[in-house]
Each structure stands twice: as structure tokens, then as C-alpha cells.
Image: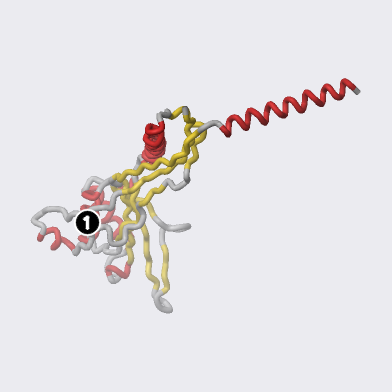
Amino acid sequence: MKQYFFIALIIVGLTNIGNSQTKNFIDQPYIEVEGHADTLVIPNEIFIKIVISERDTKDKTSVEESEAKMVDGLKKIGINPEKELTTNDLGSNYRFYFLKKKEIMKIKQYILKVPDAVTASKVFILLEDLDISNTSIERVNHSEIESIKNIMSARAVENAKAKAVTFTKPLNQTVGAAINITDQDILSFSSNSLAGKVAGIQLRGTSTFDKLNGELPKIEFERIKVSSAVNVKFILK
């Protein structure tokens, strides 16, 4: 009986020690602050949606002919179609639409990736010259977006540390090690909403280019905003 009682005392003692250690960890003085960081970056991946339709040429030029002219034109302005041009259809390269009982219209959709606004300007001029007017900016992106997100997270933690130092300095206390860091999960990547924010895209054939005295039209893309927020607890000394 005494042996069982002794073992029970040991178990209770270990439990109390564990609780005491947990309590001491929680009860030690700390400061809790939020840190924020954000930046704006110029997109270097611009995705242009292109739709070639037989209706646009009033059946004078087939989709295949328009596609061949487009591919040749892209090569002339320094774009590699095999690498940057992809079809944007599911299951088939072509889509057929029944306009009337026996009339069928063939359509093909593409996504073209270009690196900057200057190249995008050249593409829009080329497509207008080829009577391919059904084009639009689908989205923009940055090739190093994940690295930028990580940098913003690190800066957010630095911002939290600076706040903690500012708050504790009047109290003659110092900031110790961080005991908890929580990502606020509001890391934002704002870029896809381009309505009304892309200028200079309304082109009409070579006449527009001629009026600009050989200068490319200016297309300005909204910069991508990347932001991060963290919650950090620092020990107070």
C-alpha cells in the first residue's frame, strides 16, 4: 500500500511541475504587437487573350490562315510563339458555334504571355493590322511573386519588432526573444482587376500608329500590390 501511495505522490508531483512550467511560460511578461509591410511591383508577365473568329473576316479568311499570319507576325516582333503562345480551349483546339440551321462558325482562343507594356503595345498593333480585334488583357503577374511575398512577411516581423521597441522604451524595459509569431493570413496579391486601369489599348489598325509618328502607344499597367501582416509576442525584460 505504501508503495502505491509513493508512486501516486510522484505522479502528482510530476503533474504539478508540468503545470508550473506551463504557467510560468504563459505568465512571464510579454508584449504583443502586429507588424505590417507592403510593396508595389511592376508586372513582368502580361497575359493577352486572343480570339480568332471566321466571322471577324466575314469568312474571307479561315482561322488557320489568320493563325499562320499571327504566328509569323509574332516572330517578326521578337516573340517566340512556340514558347509564349498557347491555346485556351478545353478538349479541342477549335470551337464550333451554330449560328443558323446550317451555318457553322469556327473560333479559336489563345493566351499570349509577354514581359512588358512595350511588347504588349507591339502585339496589339500587330493584331489590329491582321484584323484580329477580339483581344483583351486576361491577367498580369510577376515571375518572382513568391519571393516577394516572403520578403514582405520578413519585413512585417521587423515592423513588429520596431513597434515593440518603441512601446517599451518609455518604460525602461527591453524587448527579448519572440515567443510566438502568427501569420494573420491576409497576405494579399492584388493584380487581376484591370477594368478601367489599363490605358492605351484601343487601337485601330496602322492609322493609329502613323498618327503617333512611329511611336508606340503608351500602355500603363497597374502595379501589383503585395502585403503581409503578422502578430508577434516578445518577452519583456
Asked whether residue 192 appears in the rendered view, the answer is yes
- Residue 44 point in image, percent of width and height: 30, 45
In the displayed structure, 173 sits above or below 224; it is: above
Q: Is residue 54 left or right of residue 3?
A: left
Foreground of the two, 115 or 102: 115
Foreground of the two, 188 or 214: 188
In the displayed structure, 12 sits above or below 46; it is: above
Q: Which residue is mark 1?
A: 126
Residue situated furthest left in the rendering? 213
Residue situated furthest bottom in the rendering? 101
- Residue 144 point in image, percent of width and height: 36, 40
Q: Is residue 10 left or right of residue 119?
A: right
Q: Is residue 96 left or right of residue 52?
A: right
Foreground of the two, 173 or 150: 173
Q: Give the color scheme: rainbow, by chain, secondary structure or one colour.
A: secondary structure
Asked whether residue 80 appears in the rendered view, the answer is no
Q: Is residue 54 left or right of residue 15?
A: left
Query: Which residue is depicted at the point 40% across and 48% down?
Result: 188
Query: Which residue is depicted at the point 38% across and 32% down?
Result: 169
- Residue 226 point in image, percent of width and height: 36, 45
Q: Residues within 10 Å of mark 1 (few under 14, many from 20)?
A: many
Which element is circle 1 on? helix
Quarter of the picture containing the N terminus is top right
Examine the image and state in which quarter residue 10 appears: top right
In the displayed structure, 95 sits above or below 114; it is: below
Amino acid type indicated by mark 1 = Leu
Examine the image and state in which quarter residue 95 appears: bottom left
Residue situated furthest front in the rendering? 171
Foreground of the two, 144 or 59: 144
- Residue 39 point in image, percent of width and height: 32, 43
Label count reads: 1
